[in-house]
């Protein structure tokens, strides 16, 4: 699978050497949390700069008690365009 920005880091089926490999994944249940360690152009380090005109992503932190805490809200399109000149 690959993301809409078509960056080399978008594909979750590539090994570091560039070959396609199967990824073993557990069958998720409703309410499960999935963590993808490398998300290419979709990671928070790229979105603050509105990469490819994408708005900033929301960020959540998983606490030791298992609760998710929102630590950054999703940016709206209006907020992103506000900085355009």
Image: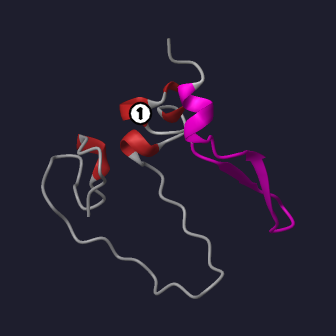
Does residue 21 belong to the magenta stretch? no
Number of callouts in the render?
A: 1
Q: Residue furthest left?
A: 19
**Lateral position of residue 67 relative to residue 53, left or right:** right
Does residue 70 belong to the magenta stretch? yes
Please state, as top left, top right, bottom left or bottom right, where the N terminus lies in the image: bottom left
Which coloring applies here? secondary structure
Q: Is residue 45 above or below residue 21?
A: above
Between residue 80 and residue 27, name the one nearer to us: 80
Q: Quadrant of residue 51?
A: top left
Q: Residue furthest top?
A: 85
Start-end of magenta stretch: 57-81
Q: Which residue is mark 1?
A: 53
**Lateral position of residue 70 relative to residue 58, left or right:** right
The residue positioned 66% from the left and 48% from the top of the image is 59
The residue positioned 59% from the left and 35% from the top of the image is 78
Q: Is residue 13 above or below residue 16?
A: below
Residue 36 placement (x, y as % from top left): 47, 58
Q: Is residue 56 above or below residue 83?
A: below
Residue 12 placement (x, y as % from top left): 31, 59
Between residue 3 and residue 67, name the one nearer to us: 3
Q: Secondary structure at mark 1?
A: helix
Q: Residues within 10 Å of mark 1 (few under 14, many from 20)?
A: few
Q: Residue furthest right?
A: 65
The residue positioned 61% from the left and 86% from the top of the image is 30
Residue 70 placement (x, y as % from top left): 77, 52
The residue positioned 53% from the left and 27% from the top of the image is 81
Residue 8 placement (x, y as % from top left): 23, 42
């Amino acid at each position: 699978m690959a993301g809409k920005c078509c960056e080399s880091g978008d594909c979750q089926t590539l090994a570091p050497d560039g070959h396609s490999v199967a990824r073993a994944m557990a069958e998720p249940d409703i309410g499960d949390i999935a963590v993808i360690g490398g998300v290419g152009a979709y990671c928070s380090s790229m979105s603050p700069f509105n990469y490819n005109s994408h708005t900033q992503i929301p960020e959540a932190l998983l606490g030791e008690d298992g609760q998710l805490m929102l630590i950054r809200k999703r940016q709206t399109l209006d907020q992103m365009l506000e900085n355009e000149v």
